[in-house]
Image (cartoon, coloured by chain):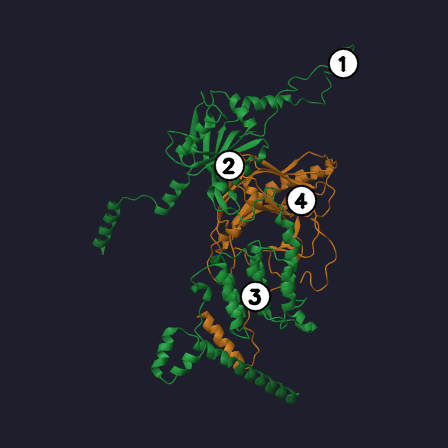
Chain colours: A green, B orange
Amino acid sequence: MIRKLHCMLRLQSGITQTLYRHRAPTILTRNYATDEANRNADDKNGNNAKRTSKSLPAVRNPFGAAQEKTKNSYLAMVEIFEERDVHRRNHVEFIYAALKHMPDFGVEHDLEVYKALINVMPKGKFIPTNVFQSEFMHYPKQQQCIIDLLEQMEDFGVMPDYEMEAMLLNVFGKKGHPLRKYWRMMYWMPKFKNLSPWPLPDQVPDDTLEVAKLAVERMCTVDLRSKVDVFETKELEDSLDDTWIVSGMSVEQSKLLKEHSPQKALYIEGPFHIWIRNRRINYFTLRADADAEFLAQLDERQLDDDDVSQIGVPFFGRAPPRRHNQLGKVRSVHQQDDGTIFAICATGTSTKDSLLSWIRLLELHGLASFDQIPVLFRFKSVVPAKAEEIAGPAVPSSDIDASLHSHKEHT
Amino acid sequence: MHCLVRQTSRLSCWLSAARIHTTAVQHTFWEREKKSGYKTKLPEPSKKQQIIDGFRDLKEEIKLWKQEVKEKLESDPILVFRPGETDVVFDFKEPDVLDKWTVTTDADHGEGKSSATLELSAAGAGLFHGEVSSQHTKDGIIKRTGYANIRTKRVRKSFKRETTYDWTQYNMLILKVRGDGRSYLINLHTEGYFDLMWNDIYHYVLYTRGGPHWQIAKIPFSKFFLSSKGRVQDRQNAIQLNCVTHFGFSVAAKKGMDGPFGLEIDYVGLEYDPSHREEFAYEMYRTPKYIAAT
C-alpha cells in the first residue's frame, strides 16, 4: 500500500515536472511579448539586444490598427494569418479578435467572412478518435471559439449554409459541439426568418426617405385602400423648410374627413416613433376625438336576437319588417375608441412648419379640405425633458458662487 | 490583484500536487433556488409585523376560500367551446390591474442600463414602455445585455397556495395591442415542480405593426416553442395549457435596436378556433442519441 502510494507520488511529481517544463516556454514568450518600452530597456543591457530583435513580435491587434476598413482588407488579413506559419499559432485568439472587429469593417452580415474565419482552423486535427474524446469536448477552447462564432452569426441574423456544415465536419467531426450548434441553427433560423407579417428588405436602406416610406407603408397596411404619397414642400410658395413629406391616407379616411363636423377640432399629434428594423422614424397623425354619438349608435344596432317578445310575422303578403339601420353605417377601422385617425405622415424635418405644409399639400392634392375645421398642433417632445435631465435643475450661477464663498469662510 | 492570486495559486498547484482545482464550479443541473442566484435579499419585517400582516391577510384569504368553496358547490364550470368568442384573461381596464404585474430589466442586478415601466395610457390600456440599451459594464462575465420584461405574478388560490391557469379548452391567444414596429416576445411560463422545469418558458414572437391603429394578434398555442434560460430546447413538446403559471412580454435591444420602446396592451384573451387543427407546429421526429439535448 505504502509502496503504491509512493509510486503514485513519484508519478505525480513527474507529471508536474513535465507540466512545468511544457509551461516554461510559454511563460517566457509571454515575457518577450511586451511593448516597445521593455524592448528599449533590453537594448540597454546589450547582451539581450540581438535576441529580442529576433524574437516574436509584440502582441498587436492587426484589426484595430488597420488603415482601410473594408471587407477586402479584412479577408486579406485572414489570408496573411493563414500563410504566415504552418502551425497557425494563436488561431483561437485571432478568431476572437476578428469576431470582435467585424462591425468596424462592416462585414458582420457577410457569410463569406465567417466561412473564411472557420477556414483558419486546421482540418482533421480536432476530430475525436474515441468515445471519451467525443464525450469530453475534444479541444474545448477551439470548439468554444467556433460556437461563439456561430452565436455571433445568430445574433446578427446570418444563416449558415451547407458548405459551412462541410467545413465544420472537416474540422470537428460529426460529434463536435459546433456541429450541434450549427444543426440547431439550421433547424430554427429558417423557421423564424420569414415569419414577420410585415417583411422588410434584407438590408434596410440607409436613406431616411426610403425608411420613412417603408414605415408609412407599414402603418397603412391596416387599410388596403391606403395610398402613400411623397410630397415635396417646394410645391408650396410659403413653406420655410425645403423637405419631403411621406403621407399615408386612404379613400375611407378622406370620406371620414369630409363627413367630419366643422365644430370639432382636428389634431396633429406627435412625434410618435416606429421602428423599421433598427431605424427609428418619427411620425405624426391627423386625428380627431372619437365620435361618441356614432359609436353609441353602433351599440344600439346590436339588437338582442334572443328577445322573442316582439316578432314581426311576415304573413299575408307583407314584407318582413326591417330592423332599423341594418344597412347603415359600418364602423371603419380608423374609428377607434380613442379617436378617429385621418392621416399619417413622416416629414424630413419633423418641424411644425413641415406639418403645416403637409396640411396644405393634402388640400392642394384634393385629398382633404380643411375649410372650416380648426387644426391644432399637439406636440409631445421628449427633447426639453431630456435637456433638463442632462443639465440638471436650473440653478442660477450667482447662487453657486455664494455657497462657495460661504464654504470658504467656514473653513 | 485577484488575477495575480489566481495565477500564483495555479503555479503553486504545479509545484506541489495538482489537486486543488482553480476553475469555477459550474452547477450544470442542480439549482439551489428558483432565481438561480439572482434572488434579491429584501429586509424581512419584524416578527411582530409579520403576525399583524398575517392576520390582516387572513381576512382576505378566508373570503377567497369561501368563494372557492361556493364555486365548487355550485359546480358550474364553462365546459362548452364557444368558437369565435374571446375570453379576456388580463384586462387592463380593471381596477388596480398594475399590481398584478412585475417589471424587470437588466439594470435590476447591475448588468445593464435598460429601464422600463408599466403604466396606464391615455387610452385606458396598459402601456409598457421604457428604453432598452445593450450597453453594460465590461466585467468579462456578461457578454450581451439589453432587455426589459413584464410578467404577471404567480397565480394563487386562497391561503397563498400556488396554482396554475387552466386554458385547456382554448387554442388561440388573442392580444389587442398597439406597438411601435418592434417585435416582442410572448412568454408563457410553465414552471414545474423539479428544478429542471423551473425555467421552462414557451415563447412566440409578437410582431407589431406600429402606428396609431390597434392591432389584434391571434396566435395559436401550437406555435409556441419550449426554451429554458433563453435557449431553445432540442426536445420540444406542445405547451400543456393546464400548467401555465405566468404570462409576460419581453423586449430586447438586439441587432442595434437600442432605444425607446412602447407596447400598449388593451387585453390578453383566449379563444377556441375549431378550424385550427394543428397540435404542434414543429417536427417531432426522433433526434439522434447523444447529440440532441446535450
Between circles 2 and 4, the one closer to the viewer is 2
User: Quick one: which residue is furthest to the top in this view?
Assistant: A316
Q: Are marks 1 and 3 on the same chain?
A: yes
Q: Please, is residue A140 above or below residue A236 in the view?
A: below
Q: Give the labeled residue for mark 2.
A: B121
Of pointers 1 and 3, the one earlier in the residue sequence: 3
- Mark 1 to mark 4 CA distance (whole Å): 49 Å
Q: Chain of mark 2?
A: B
Counting from the top left corner in percent of width and height, residue A138 is at 63, 71
Assess disc 2: are there few (<14), some (14-19) or many (≥20) residues with their C-alpha within 10 Å of its C-alpha. Answer: some
- Mark 2 to mark 4 CA distance (whole Å): 27 Å
Q: Nearer the viewer, residue A199 or B261?
A: A199
- Under circle 3, the secondary element is helix
- Mark 2 to mark 1 CA distance (whole Å): 50 Å
* Residue plotted at (50% across, 51% down): B256
- Under circle 2, the secondary element is loop
Q: Give the labeled residue for mark 4.
A: B165
Q: Give the labeled residue for mark 1.
A: A314
Between circles 3 and 2, the one closer to the viewer is 3
Q: Give the labeled residue for mark 3.
A: A145
The kind of residue on which mark 3 rests is Cys
Q: Please, is residue B258 above or below residue A35 in the view?
A: above
Assess disc 4: are there few (<14), some (14-19) or many (≥20) residues with their C-alpha within 10 Å of its C-alpha. Answer: some
